[in-house]
Structure formats: C-alpha cells, structure tokens
Image (tube, helix red, strand yellow):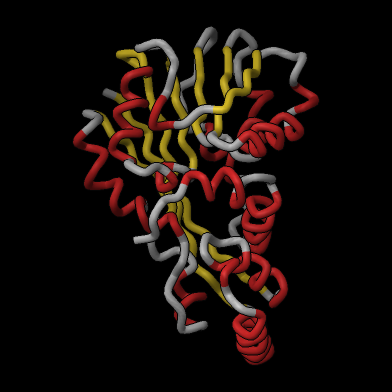
Amino acid sequence: MIRVNKKYLVDKQYRTADNFKIRSNLHRYGINKTPFWPWVRDKYPIFPGNKILEVGCGLGTFWKEVYQTIPKTCEITLSDISPGMITASQETLKEYLLSKPILNFEVTDIENLSYPAAHFDLIIAHFMLYHADSPEKALLEIKKVLKENGHVGIMLPSKNNMQKLFDLLTIENPIQAQNFSSEIALSVLPNYFSTIQTYSNENMLQIDSTEAIVNYIKTLSTMDQKSKAFYKYCKTLLEKYIQQEGFLLLPIQQLLFVVSC
C-alpha cells in the first residue's frame, strides 16, 4: 500500500493542475465514445433547490460537462484539499461563475468537513477517496453532512486498471488508487450505507504514443524519484512494443456507487 501524504498532495502532486491534466488526457485514447461525465450525471437524483457538495473537485470537469442539466435553483459547492485545484476548477468554470445554479469554491479536507450536519442533498466523490488517510473516516464525515434522504456518488477505479502497463515494464504499480479501489469499496460501503446501486463503465485505452505513456508515468506518486535511465528504459521498451503491436491496449473499468443511508 502506498502511504497517503497530504502535504505531498497539496505541495507537489496537486499544487497545479499539470499532473492531473496529463493523466486525464490519456483517456482520449479510449475506444468507448459514450461521453463519460454525462453518463455519470444521469445516475444522480438532482432536483430543484438541492444543495450539492463535490469533495475533491479536481479540474471541475464534471460540472463543465453537465452544468446546463442542473436545475438553476440548485447550489453547488466544489471543494478540494489543494488550493491549486480550486484555482484550476474556477478557471474551467469561469463562464458559469455569474450564472445559476450557484457555484461555490472552498479548500476543504474530506476527513474534516466543517459544514453543518444534514446539510447536503447530494455529495459527490469522484476518484478521490484513496487520497484520504482513512477512507472510513471520510465516509463518516460524508454521512455527517448528508441529509437523511440524501445520496452520495462515489466513483472509483478497479485495482487492475493500468496493471498491464506496469507488468510490461516489470515494475511495481505505483498508483495510489489501489489503496481504496472499487473492489475494496464493495466490501466497505455496506458498513456505512443501507442502499447501494452499482454501475460499471468499461473502456479500452488504445495508445500509440510512447510519449503520452511516459509522461503519464512521470506524474504518478513516487515516480518523480526515478532516474533518467529508468525513463529511458521505459521509452525504449514501449517504443519496441508499440512498433511490434501498433499500440498498447489497456483495459479500464470504473465503478460508480450511488448510495444512501
């Protein structure tokens, strides 16, 4: 298990949006052309007047994709532990800052939410619970500020996502998402929520760019400690593989859990 270091996340990994953008851009090689974020939005019960919280908002891309579908009387709070990501999400959503529904932006730690109890109708946690020191504590904090009849949307990757890449390179998978994967969530979430709906989104990344893969690896936690010789090795091996096969095919599975108390 990769240890969670929040100072590292705030000061380096997510100080700016650069690493996040590089990892997100890798998904442009996906062969599933169904728009991902609208697919997620369709699973959420969102009604006029709802108060919505996103923890770990990242670039704010979800709202960029679905903002026009949200009732104008809703109030949306985007939060993240990193001030740099809050700045990035404000930039992403700048065209909507003076519109309705209302958008709020706050630096917040999911393990220490300061909102009133039973305040939100919907809480969203996309690809972020594995960044908590204790995902269990984070889930308790979410329950605390969730209304009795509210819902939570939790998106997590499979622990096997990208594993083929690291098997090819014969190195340990450094992806922090393994700390709280969709497989782990399947056993943990019933301890906190009585109703759990599970949706699977599957894709294949068909990548023919060695540069895109190497840049992706460089953004992962702990991989910035690797030598130039290591990355030269990765590049040489990947170039040979792609030259022979035409591309690197990586299976991807993301699970969306829509849960309630």
Quadrant of the rendered image containing residue 45: top left
- Residue at horizontal 57 percent and vertical 35 percent from the top: 57
- Residue at horizontal 58 percent and vertical 13 percent from the top: 75
| Left or right of 47 in this view: 259 | left
Q: Residue furthest right?
A: 95
Look at the picture and state if 242 lies above or below 173. Answer: below
Look at the picture and state if 157 lies above or below 245. Answer: above
Q: Position of residue 253 (x, y in %)?
A: 45, 57
| Left or right of 161 in this view: 38 | right
Q: Position of residue 148 (x, y in %)?
A: 30, 13
| Left or right of 56 in this view: 156 | left
| Left or right of 49 in this view: 141 | left
- Residue at horizontal 51 percent and vertical 82 percent from the top: 169
On-image quarter of the N terminus:
bottom left
| Count of marks placed on residues | 0
On-image quarter of the C terminus:
top left
* In-front residue for pair 117/35: 117
**Residue 215 in view:** yes
Look at the picture and state if 188 lies above or below 120. Answer: below
Q: Position of residue 7 (x, y in %)?
A: 51, 45
**Residue 245 in view:** no
* In-front residue for pair 4/185: 4
Quadrant of the rendered image containing residue 197: top left
Q: Position of residue 12 (x, y in %)?
A: 61, 51
- Residue at horizontal 32 percent and vertical 41 percent from the top: 134
